[in-house]
């Protein structure tokens, strides 16, 4: 989880990802941020995030992103 928070902070420096749980709903992340996050997670965790996983529920918080990464690593 610590590495994920580092990645997110590199993409969007001014956001406290540990406390936010409405990153998309509140407009904190935009589509460009999402693309950067997807690319960074694919590289860092050696996963491939399919289009079916690119839904608001998976990108609204660091916790939901981490859960998605773990799920994809198991597949």
Image (cartoon, rainbow, N blue to C red):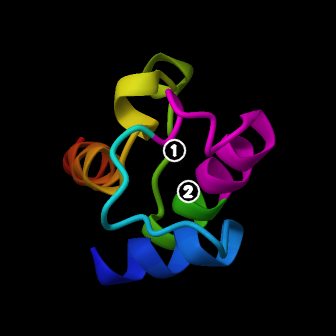
Residue 59, above or below 10:
above
The count of marks equals: 2
Q: Is mark 1 on a helix, strand or loop?
A: loop
Residue 65, magenta (yes or no): no
The numbered dot on residue 63 is none
Please say if 36 is above or below 51.
below
Front position in the image: 26 or 69: 26
- Residue 48's disc is 1
Q: Do the residues labelled 2 and 1 touch (CB within 8 Å)?
A: yes
Please give the range of residues in magenta.
23-39
Asked if residue 49 lies left or right of residue 4, the reply is: right
Pick the residue in front: 38 or 59. Answer: 59
| Residue 58 occupies quadrant | top left
Residue 71 image point, x, y percent: 22, 43
Q: Quadrant of residue 10?
A: bottom right
Callout 2: few (<14), some (14-19), or many (20+) C-alpha neighbours within 10 Å? some
Closest to the observer: 11 or 43? Answer: 11
**Residue located farthest toward the right when viewing the structure as drawn:** 32
Q: Name the residue under label 2.
A: 42
At horizontal 42% and vertical 74% (from top left) the residue drawn is 5
Toward the top, the furthest residue is 52
> Where does the image place residue 37, in percent across and percent down from the top left?
61, 54
Rendering coords of residue 18 (x, y %)? 32, 67
Is 30 inside the magenta-drawn segment? yes
Quarter of the picture containing the C terminus is: top left
Which element type, helix, strand or loop, lies under badge 2?
helix
What residue do we see at 72% from left, 43% from top?
A: 35
Image quarter of the N terminus: bottom left
2 or 1: tag closer to the N-terminus: 2
| Residue 14, above or below 51 | below
Instruction: Answer with left or right where residue 17 lies relative to residue 15.
Output: left
């Amino acid at each position: 989880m610590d590495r994920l928070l580092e990645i997110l902070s590199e993409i969007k420096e001014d956001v406290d990802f540990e406390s936010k749980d409405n990153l998309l709903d509140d407009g904190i992340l935009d589509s460009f941020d999402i693309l950067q996050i997807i690319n960074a997670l694919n590289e860092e965790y050696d996963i491939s995030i399919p289009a079916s996983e690119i839904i608001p529920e998976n990108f609204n918080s660091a916790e939901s992103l981490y859960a998605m990464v773990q799920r994809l690593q198991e597949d």
